[in-house]
Amino acid sequence: MSDFLPAEFENRMRKELGDEYEAFEEALRSERYRGLRINPLKKRAELTIREPGENPGASEETGSLVGTSPEALFNLTEKIDWADGGYYYGDETPGKHPYHEAGVYYIQEPSAMLPASLLGAKPGEKILDLCAAPGGKSTQIAAMMAGEGLLVSNEINSKRAAILSENIERMGIRNAVVTSESPDSLAPRFEGFFDRIMVDAPCSGEGMFRKNDEAIKQWSPENVSACAERQAGILDCAARMLRSGGKIVYSTCTFAREENEESIEKFLKRHPDFTCLKMHRLWPHKIKGEGHFAAELIKAGPEAVIASAQPMAAADKKKLKEYLKDIVKDDCFEEEGPLYSGSLVTFGDNIYLCPAAMPSIKGLKVLRPGLCLGSLKKDRFEPAHSLALALQADMAERSVNLNLKDSADYIKGLTKNAEGEKGWCLVLTEGYSLGWGKIAGGILKNHYPKGLRKDL
């Protein structure tokens, strides 16, 4: 018997895996794999540098920004087969870098990237991530949506929902609404509404044994059964909220058949209008990642026609243009621009751009009703950090590009010298949007949020 796995778990897995068990246990004892996904929503700017040679990321010959790509910086050479933009990394620390704070990539366990890939989100669709914290799958789905359509990212636990909301902001996602409700509360509000639903269900966590000792300590057969019962209720709510012809991807990070194949078999008996397209197993002794399960479920009915984005109401557009005058360019309000579609929603002093497809949020516990654009303070508008992260450099009226060292100082909260026209300025880290500053008298006043400031 092994000296670190629960005996009942080991006995069950020996029966299930047979001759493969020894390789399986050896994998659980070995070093885990680490991964990250490059965020396609964040694009590096091509900028003209005022004083060639001043920025180590600039080319003196062309004046265009070269910078260091994340792939080169962290030696990202081995791709993750099942995730676009996914890479393995080694001993580097990408979590302590300006690019991380700018949302250039998302650090995520490699196997956990499979379910969102299977969901196959498309721009313009209405998508629900029902159990979304901390945000890995939501941010991957949003990347596939390319800023078009509606993503509702829900997490019942309010503390975890706050972390989810922070990650949605950091990755520059503008078409997401973050809620903190139970599936039972959401289901009657969104009957037959969504095109696709991700159900990354709370589970017994067996697939995380290699990376999380606490998961081993908390494991029990009783917990496996309790998780399976809870998962059934969550899946039933998801079925109510899916339109005809829509798709659910159900996933867990456990090896237990009771929570995986058996859960799907029971679901199909309760919902004969669904079929299972395919079930997937990722085993740690067969792939470079942790244990994961995913099932693709299709609801009978025709495929939906995705409507094109509708322009913002004229009154909202006029008001928003006034708020953002001399901060963003008019192109932002044109078709394909980040501020073309949606409606303005006010929460206290904060003004949000709510995705156009989102129905009324009245009565829902909402942490983020869309993209936070800014706040009104004493009759003056102050742009939000969220807006900075959602913009590309060429969308701002003014921008200042910092090299990596100066970017780290900016994240600490330090001021910098900066020549330029007085006013709000988009701060970039080697061409990636990072936050706001305000130029006055040759000084860039730091407006990086105090709650996010840190030493990298």
Image (cartoon, rainbow, N blue to C red):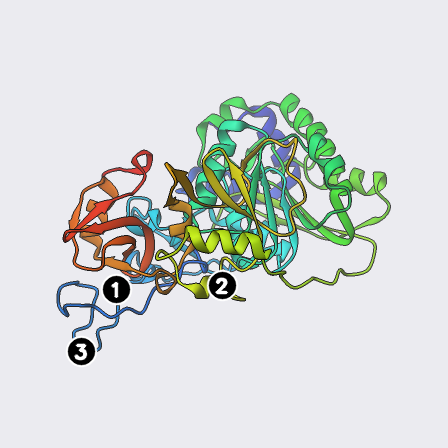
Kind of residue at badge 1: Gly
Q: Residues within 10 Å of mark 2 (few under 14, many from 20)?
A: some
Q: Which residue is mark 1?
A: 67
The quadrant of the picture occupied by the C terminus is top left
Can residue 34 be seen at all in this image of the molecule? no
Q: Residue 61: which quarter of the image?
A: bottom left
Residue found 57% across the figure and 43% down from its top: 177
Residue found 81% across the figure and 43% down from its top: 268
**Marks 2,1: beta carbons within 8 A:** no
The tally of labels here is: 3
Asked if 231 appears above or below 17 in the picture, the reply is above
Cα separation between marks 2 and 1? 25 Å
Q: Position of residue 292 (x, y in %)?
A: 58, 44
Q: Which residue is mark 2?
A: 337
**Marks 3,1: beta carbons within 8 A:** no
Q: Position of residue 446 (x, y in %)?
A: 24, 44
Pointer 2 or 1: first along the chain: 1
Pointer 3 or 2: first along the chain: 3
Q: Secondary structure at mark 2?
A: loop
Cα separation between marks 3 and 2? 31 Å
Kind of residue at badge 2: Gly
Of badges 3 and 1, the one in the foreground is 3
| Left or right of 20 in this view: 349 | left
| Left or right of 255 in this view: 442 | left
Cα separation between marks 3 and 1? 14 Å
Residue found 29% across the figure and 35% down from its top: 450
Can residue 124 be seen at all in this image of the molecule? yes
Pointer 3 or 1: first along the chain: 3
Q: Residues within 10 Å of mark 3 (few under 14, many from 20)?
A: few
Q: Which residue is mark 3?
A: 61
**Of the pair 158 and 328, the residue shown nearer to us:** 328
Kind of residue at badge 3: Glu
